[in-house]
């Protein structure tokens, strides 16, 4: 039904573009967009053909080893259409290349339910780790992918990229986001955990971007920006040439690739959007449209992560954060556990309950950059910092206070009365109090470490060991497949709207690593089996200051943490945990590589207060 409706719509849009062209109004630009659409259509067709080929190889009973080559080819063709496919159809793209883990389907009208994974990453696993009886599954997955792409091709023929309101900004925004995606996911091996085919796939993705830019040659000329055009093509060619010099996944110098090629390219694309006069649609997005690269100090949009903040609210919030008035016995403030000399954590395995009779359930996390998340607590229990603040204050083990009552008392204190007057026109209640503290929390930004300054141009600031450590973090160590740039937490690129949780198999005690910690994690909130022992991926910024580590504070040093990962997490230590999302295999890091990894993490220390 929808299809029949869309076909005439497509024809209508086609005529619409045609009429623009005749008027000569946006002649070159429409021509460029049509060329991009044609290119995209060709790539989708090629993707479909590559799936048919893999399908026929399977039917001809080729063994899994022989299937690797057609599979890798198919992935590279996918990468050549990825930039628009993900941009235009993000749900579809997740079905095509989503992570190979069960997720949950959420709809507010129905109960949460589990959703098995499909697509390229499932196919990769079935080809690289075949088992008795998985052949049928492989055949089914390939058939499913074939059907999905056939539908995508149909839809695209009918709709054209115009269905987004302005096609030029759609295309250029998609180009810019693809550069961010390459940096935060592509080169880390995020979607190719088995084949580690990142290098050829990055070449394929960049090659498409070059073709897209080439479609705009006349547009640049007409705008008297010919040299800009040439700059872009030169940068894209240089990036591909650099990739050709790289040997393999483990030795790939990602840091140089980022600073010398990707960042100049994303800066170039951001500037072109403005110079060509393409206007972004007005909606508040996590990433700033003006940010020129992923580690730009402006990368995150305050309007999304920290709306309505004022210096007055922050000042008031800071005072409240340090005031013991919120604890029922007046002995502790937020700062008792979130200490500025401990990276806003407390240095303890677990802090004590208010009455001192028991330990809290979990280790105190750092609050640096807490704003850059859309879920809070280790189990992702709440989605707004204001809710989080109220939760802590009301928790009898933590503070045992009552915000409504305490807010009433605050107005009797002249200093607070003055601050509430300037910040909230004198309104003192539960919500303004929580908002003030949350505003202070959102102001706690730490994005200027030695590592950041190195990336931004101070190239003498990192040692060879720290640089190598970053390359291991983003490559052989697989760390960056969960701790995503630039916050190195679970905020998921390239849209940065959701925080991921993962199952690592963290033990209860370091001395008995084969015994799993019994904290159920996210399961406590969702009651979904797939969230059992799942914890939010925390940032490793300032991690030098926040020992001990993990939700239960089980590891005292970064060396212990790295050793845990080296052996494959819980599974590697003999815990039977089928749902573990961390690969259970050894990383095979050398002693020097482990040292480098830790040096890199320490280069992220930046505690401005
Ligand atoms: C007794 C120690 C203690 C006190 C006091 C305390 N916290 Fe915490 N805080 C913790 C612990 C432990 C956690 C982790 C709890 C969890 O994840 O289940 C936490 C978590 C948080 C988080 C979530 C961080 C994230 O990334 O998810 C925020 C925000 C926070 N606290 C803010 C505050 C504020 C604001 C106050 C004062 C109103 C406060 N805390 C008082 C111990 C404390
Ligand atoms: C499968 C996803 C995943 C991978 C891969 C991964 N991490 Fe983590 N990391 C997490 C999660 C989730 C947590 C929080 C776990 C918890 O608290 O139980 C975490 C916690 C940490 C912590 C502790 C932070 C703190 O303040 O307590 C450090 C340090 C760390 N990871 C470093 C690394 C390094 C180094 C690597 C690579 C060798 C790595 N991670 C790979 C998901 C991952």
Image (cartoon, rainbow, N blue to C red):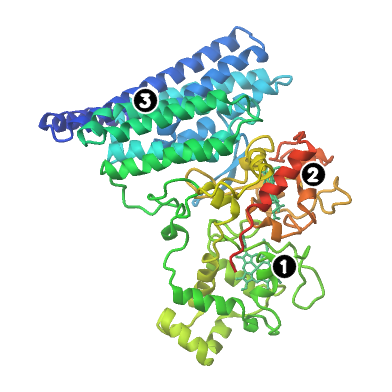
Alpha carbon distance from label 2 to label 1 = 23 Å
User: What residue sits 53% from the left and 57% below the top?
Assistant: 372
Quadrant containing ligand 1: bottom right
Q: Can residue 362 be seen in this view?
A: yes
Residue found farthest to the left: 23
User: What residue sits 58% from the left and 10% below the top?
Assistant: 57
User: What residue sits 78% from the left and 62% below the top?
Assistant: 349
> Would you name the residue on which mark 1 appears?
346
573 on left or right of 475: right
The disc, 3 or 2, on the residue closer to the chain's N-terminal end is 3
Q: Does the residue labelled 1 lie within 8 Å of ligand 1?
A: yes
Relative depth, front residue between 99 and 279: 279
Alpha carbon distance from label 1 to label 3 = 53 Å
The disc, 1 or 3, on the residue closer to the chain's N-terminal end is 3
As helix, strand or loop, the secondary structure at mark 1 comes to loop
253 on left or right of 95: right
Q: Position of residue 591 (x, y in %)?
A: 79, 39
Q: Position of residue 157 (x, y in %)?
A: 32, 25
Q: Position of residue 72 (x, y in %)?
A: 57, 20
368 on left or right of 552: left
Q: Dot 3, how many residues are within 10 Å of its Cα: few (below 14), some (14-19), or many (20+)?
A: some
> Would you name the residue on which mark 2 appears?
563
> Would you name the residue on which mark 3 appears?
211
As helix, strand or loop, the secondary structure at mark 2 comes to helix
Image label count:
3
Residue found farthest to the right: 511
* In the image, residue 374 above or below residue 328: above
* In the image, residue 47 above or below residue 601: above
Q: Is residue 81 visible?
A: no
Q: Are marks 1 and 3 in contact (CB under 8 Å)?
A: no
């Amino acid at each position: 039904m929808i299809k029949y409706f869309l076909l005439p719509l497509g024809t209508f849009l086609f005529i619409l573009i045609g009429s623009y062209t005749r008027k000569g109004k946006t002649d070159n630009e429409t021509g460029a967009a049509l060329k991009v659409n044609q290119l995209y259509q060709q790539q989708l067709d090629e993707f479909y053909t590559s799936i048919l080929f893999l399908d026929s190889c399977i039917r001809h009973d080729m063994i899994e080893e022989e299937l690797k080559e057609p599979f890798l080819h198919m992935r590279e063709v996918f990468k050549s259409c990825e930039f628009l496919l993900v941009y235009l159809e993000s749900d579809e793209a997740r079905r095509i290349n989503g992570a190979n883990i069960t997720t949950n389907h959420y709809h507010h009208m129905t109960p949460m339910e589990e959703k098995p994974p499909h697509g390229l990453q499932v196919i990769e696993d079935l080809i690289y780790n075949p088992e008795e009886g998985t052949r049928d599954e492989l055949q089914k997955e390939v058939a499913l992918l074939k059907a999905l792409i056939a539908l995508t091709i149909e839809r695209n023929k009918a709709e054209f990229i115009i269905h987004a309101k302005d096609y030029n900004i759609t295309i250029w925004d998609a180009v810019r986001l693809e550069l961010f995606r390459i940096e935060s996911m592509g080169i880390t091996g995020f979607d190719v955990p088995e084949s580690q085919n990142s290098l050829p796939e990055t070449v394929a993705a960049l090659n498409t971007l070059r073709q897209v830019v080439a479609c705009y040659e006349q547009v640049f000329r007409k705008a008297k920006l010919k040299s800009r055009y040439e700059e872009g093509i030169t940068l894209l060619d240089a990036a591909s040439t650099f990739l050709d010099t790289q040997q393999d996944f483990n030795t790939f110098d990602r840091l140089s690739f980022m600073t010398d090629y990707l960042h100049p390219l994303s800066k170039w694309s951001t500037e072109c959007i403005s110079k060509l006069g393409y206007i972004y649609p007005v909606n508040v997005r996590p990433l700033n449209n003006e940010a020129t690269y992923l580690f730009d100090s402006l990368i995150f949009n305050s309007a999304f992560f920290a709306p309505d903040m004022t210096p007055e609210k922050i000042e008031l919030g800071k005072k409240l954060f340090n005031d013991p008035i919120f604890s029922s016995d007046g002995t502790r403030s937020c700062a008792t556990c979130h200490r500025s000399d401990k990276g806003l954590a407390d240095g303890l395995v677990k802090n004590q309950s208010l009455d001192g009779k028991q330990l809290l359930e979990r280790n105190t996390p750092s609050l640096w950059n807490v704003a850059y998340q859309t879920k809070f607590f280790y189990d992702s229990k709440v989605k707004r910092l204001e809710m989080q603040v109220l939760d802590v204050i009301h928790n009898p083990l933590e503070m045992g206070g009552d915000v409504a009552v305490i807010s009433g008392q605050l107005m009797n204190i002249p200093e607070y009365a003055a601050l509430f007057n300037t910040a909230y026109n004198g309104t003192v209640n539960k919500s303004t109090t929580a908002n003030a503290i949350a505003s202070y929390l959102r102001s706690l930004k730490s994005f200027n470490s030695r590592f950041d300054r190195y990336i931004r141009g101070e190239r003498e600031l990192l040692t060879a060991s720290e640089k190598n450590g970053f390359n291991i973090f983003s490559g052989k160590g697989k760390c960056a497949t969960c701790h995503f740039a630039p916050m190195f937490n679970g905020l998921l690129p390239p849209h940065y709207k959701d925080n991921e949780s993962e199952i690592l198999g963290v033990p209860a005690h370091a001395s008995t690593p084969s015994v799993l910690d019994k904290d159920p994690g996210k399961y406590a909130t969702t009651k979904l089996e797939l969230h059992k022992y799942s914890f939010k991926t925390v940032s490793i910024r300032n991690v030098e200051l926040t020992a001990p580590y993990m939700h239960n504070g089980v590891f005292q040093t970064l060396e212990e943490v790295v050793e845990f990962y080296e052996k494959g997490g819980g599974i590697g230590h003999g815990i039977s945990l089928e749902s573990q999302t961390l690969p259970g295999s050894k990383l095979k890091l050398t002693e020097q590589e482990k040292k480098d990894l830790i040096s890199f993490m320490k280069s992220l220390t930046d505690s401005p207060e």
